[in-house]
Amino acid sequence: MSETIQKSSGVSQAQFSIIAGVSRKTVTTWKSKGFLVFLDDVTVDVDASIALLRDRGLGNFGDVTPSVTPSETGNSFDDGPDPFAVAVERTEQARQIGDVAAEVMNSPDFELLSYADASRMKENFLALTQRLNYETKVGRLVDRSEVEADFANRWAAERNAWEVWPSTVCGDIAAQLGLDQVKVRVVLEAAVHSHLTARIQAAYDEVA
């Protein structure tokens, strides 16, 4: 949420260091060299100081812009991004990135590489990525999830075909052998169920 900066109050040097993206020591140095503009209450005039520093190529203001001209009351700055709020948000984002970097570097698996090793690893990664893209494009590699889905669909179709088979053939078999059709169907269903169960168990054993 954007805050309204009162022209009469300005900001402290510590706050301005956040706006400028520099250390407090740097702000103190700018003050000693006359690169900051102060208000009557000895706080930093944000707009004037930013303009002065930008003319000298100093500061890391990024997208921070002056808080526009004063309103008709002459007391506040409206209708523009608050440079302090923008800088605070940018600093918070930088801290989050820094926290992630620190977590990675403190990991027991982290190893700081030399420039030559890092460059070689980068080139190898790029080469492998290009090869992977090529193999996929020409059809030598396929997505594993697609293969697994296709296999599951094929297996389901085969299983369904086997499960309905006893019902489709039991009548003919019973007529040829002179047996009861229901008893033939029950025997065939039991045999098919045993066969499918054995196949499933064999597949699990191979994976294990």
Image (cartoon, helix red, strand yellow):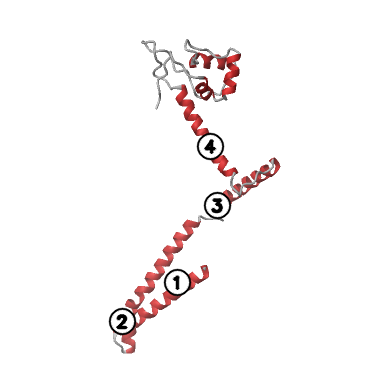
State which quarter of the image contains the N terminus. top left
Residue 57 appears in view: no
Kindly identify which residue carries mark 4.
Answer: 97
Three-letter code, disc 1: Ile
| Pointers 2 and 3 in contact (C-beta within 8 Å) | no
Mark 3 or 1 closer to N-term?
A: 3
Q: CA distance from mark 3 to mark 1?
A: 31 Å
Kindly identify which residue carries mark 3.
Answer: 136
| Pointers 3 and 1 in contact (C-beta within 8 Å) | no
Viewer-nearest residue: 3 or 136: 3
- State the image coordinates of residue 167 (x, y, percent, origin top left): 32, 77
In what element is the residue under mark 2?
helix
Q: CA distance from mark 2 to mark 3?
A: 50 Å
Q: CA distance from mark 3 to mark 4?
A: 34 Å
Mark 1 or 4: the one toward you: 4
Mark 3 or 4 closer to N-term?
A: 4
- State the image coordinates of residue 137 (x, y, percent, origin top left): 55, 50
Kindly identify which residue carries mark 1.
Answer: 200
Viewer-nearest residue: 92 or 167: 92
- State the image coordinates of residue 148 (x, y, percent, origin top left): 47, 60
Image position of 131 (left or right of 73) = right
Q: From this viewpoint, which residue is outermost toward the front?
A: 41
Q: Residues within 10 Å of mark 2 (few under 14, many from 20)?
A: some
- Mark on residue 171? 2
Mark 2 or 3: the one toward you: 3
Q: Residues within 10 Å of mark 4 (few under 14, many from 20)?
A: few
